[in-house]
Structures are given as C-alpha cells and as structure tokens.
C-alpha cells in the first residue's frame, strides 16, 4: 500500500457570520502522524470533517497526492475514520462491522474474509469476531473501530478524539497501541485531540489550532522548546 501526502490550501469555512476555519494551510507528509491540537471550539473537528468530505469548505482545497478532493464524496475518498464514540453498528457482530466497508467495495467473499481476519489480527482481537459491540469493553470497541478503519487498506486514516471516552490508564495504553499500529502500516494519519500530553506523546508533528487558524506546525520537542507565540507557549505549557 502506498500512502499519500495531504495538502490543505487556503481552507475557509463559515457558518453564517461565524468563521470557523480562517485560511488554513497545512502539509501532511506521506506516512506522517500529524495531530491537530487545540482548545475546544478551535475548529479541529470541522477541519477533519472537511478533509473527510462530510463538510464542504467555503473555499480552499484539500489535495491528496495531487488530486483535489473537495468535490469527491466521502465514500470515494479512500480514507478510514475513527470517532470518539466508536460508531460501531450495534446489530452487527465484530466480524460484520469490520466487513462493512469491504462489502461496499468490490471484494469477493473470500477476499473479505481474509481482510477481516487480517484487520482483527492487527488489533489482536481475532477471537472476538462473533461477539456484538455491547459485549465489548471500551478499549476493545475502539480496537474494532480501528480494525474497521484500516481493513480496506485506505491511503489515509483520520481519527477524531478516539481515546476521550476511555479512562486514563487505558488511554495511555491505547496511545502506544495506535502509534505502534501507525508505524506498522505506515499510513498517513491525522489525529484530533485537545490533550497536549497525548499529542506530544504520539505525533511526528503537531498543528496547533487556535480560533480557526494554525498557530504553529512543528515536531513535539520544537513546539515545547520554541513556541512561536504566547498562545502556543501557554497551551503547550499547560500540559505539565
Ligand atoms: P473543536 O473540534 O476544536 O472543538 P469544532 O470544529 O467542533 O471545534 O467547532 C469550531 C467552532 O465552530 C465552534 O465555535 C462551533 O460552535 C462552531 N460550529 C461547528 N459546527 C457548526 C455548525 N454546523 N453551525 C454553526 N457553528 C458550528
């Protein structure tokens, strides 16, 4: 699988008089783990949803490779998504949940079975394929959501606060698991969090967002040691 870079150019989004994204430029390298970090209401989820195609921008471009995705519907964007609330289908077994995105693509039954197995193996939950989501712990549910998101070898993985519903200990464990999964798959990843420590632990680079603008994009150590402005210094400093 080849992963692709993402290039966001002059992206704006307004809801009536409210400007939610105010000229966002961001380059995510192929295979990079990029985190969007900012306080609540800064525009992180909106930016992620524009990249996913669930929200149309007011202006600007989202390039994946050299292709402008702004007019491509979500199901044609070849991306996996993981949400805070897991978004598993309660009436489907684990195996059926993971198979769902595969069935919507043109794979044979045998290919689907192979890919479901491979995805469950990645998150080490092969034994649970006949269970229903209600029979799983929070951590297991999020692992299944991850398996479903990567089952069809997407070029891009988008995650919106995937660990916020988990308790602290499990969250710290899952941070390592997700980062490890990223390293094994090498998939270009954009990860949204409001948690500074989580961002500093997991990311290759962090884009700090404030009021719909990118305040700074840098590697964790550089953000910490050389914040570009007071907002970044205060916000990153809050993590200690
Ligand atoms: P974050 O993910 O950083 O918490 P969001 O992207 O969810 O931020 O929201 C950014 C801002 O946009 C907030 O002020 C929010 O109230 C506003 N907003 C988001 N979606 C809508 C919408 N559909 N209509 C009006 N305002 C919205």
Image (cartoon, helix red, strand yellow):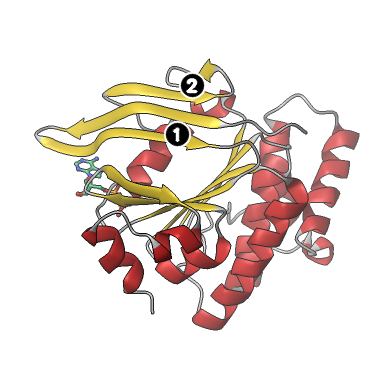
Q: Is residue 187 left or right of residue 222?
A: right
Instruction: Reply above or below: 20 against 232.
Output: above
Q: Is residue 229 left or right of residue 108?
A: left
User: Disc 2 marks which residue?
Assistant: 69
Please tell me in which quadrant of the rendered image residue 46 appears. top left
User: Disc 1 marks which residue?
Assistant: 51
Q: Do labels 1 and 2 touch, CB within 8 Å? A: yes
Q: Dot 2, how many residues are within 10 Å of its Cα: few (below 14), some (14-19), or many (20+)?
A: many
Position in image of residue 151 (x %, y %)? 73, 43
Which of marks 2 and 1 precedes in the sequence?
A: 1
Q: CB at mark 2 closer than 8 A to ligand 1?
A: no
Q: 198 or 136: nearer the eye?
A: 198
Position in image of residue 120 (x %, y %)? 79, 56
Q: Is residue 58 left or right of residue 94?
A: left
Please tell me in which quadrant of the rendered image residue 176 appears. bottom right
Q: Residue furthest left?
A: 17
Helix, strand or loop at mark 1: helix
Instruction: Reply above or below: 174 against 130.
Output: below
Position in image of residue 85 (x %, y %)? 48, 59
Q: Confirm whether residue 92 shows in the render.
A: no
Q: Residue furthest front?
A: 226
Residue drawn at (58%, 56%), measured in percent from left and top?
90
Helix, strand or loop at mark 2: loop
Q: Dot 1, how many residues are within 10 Å of its Cα: few (below 14), some (14-19), or many (20+)?
A: many
Residue drawn at (67%, 30%), measured in percent from left and top?
104
Please tell me in which quadrant of the rendered image residue 41 appears. bottom left
**Where residue 77 is drawn, which disc sits there?**
none
Q: Name the quarter where the C terminus is drawn.
A: bottom left
């Amino acid at each position: 699988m080849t992963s692709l870079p993402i290039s966001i150019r002059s992206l704006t989004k307004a809801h009536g008089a409210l400007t939610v994204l105010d000229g966002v430029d961001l380059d995510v390298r192929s295979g990079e783990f990029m985190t969007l970090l900012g306080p609540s209401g800064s525009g992180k989820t909106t930016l992620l949803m524009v990249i996913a195609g669930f929200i149309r921008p007011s202006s600007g471009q989202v390039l994946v490779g050299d292709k402008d995705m702004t007019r491509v519907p979500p199901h044609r964007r070849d991306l996996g998504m993981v949400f805070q609330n897991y978004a598993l289908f309660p009436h489907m077994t684990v195996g059926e949940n993971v198979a769902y995105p595969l069935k919507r693509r043109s794979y044979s039954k045998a290919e689907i079975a192979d890919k479901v197995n491979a995805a469950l193996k990645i998150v080490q939950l092969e034994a649970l394929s006949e269970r229903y989501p209600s029979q799983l712990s929070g951590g297991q549910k999020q692992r299944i959501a991850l398996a479903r998101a990567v089952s069809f070898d997407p070029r891009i993985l988008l995650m919106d606060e995937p660990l916020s519903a988990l308790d602290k200990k499990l969250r710290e464990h899952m941070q390592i698991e997700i980062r490890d999964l990223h390293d094994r798959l090498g998939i270009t990843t954009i990860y949204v969090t409001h948690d500074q420590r989580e961002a500093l632990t997991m990311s290759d680079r962090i884009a700090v967002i404030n009021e719909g603008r990118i305040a700074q994009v840098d590697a964790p150590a550089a953000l910490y040691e050389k914040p570009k402005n007071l907002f970044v210094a205060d916000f990153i400093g809050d993590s200690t």
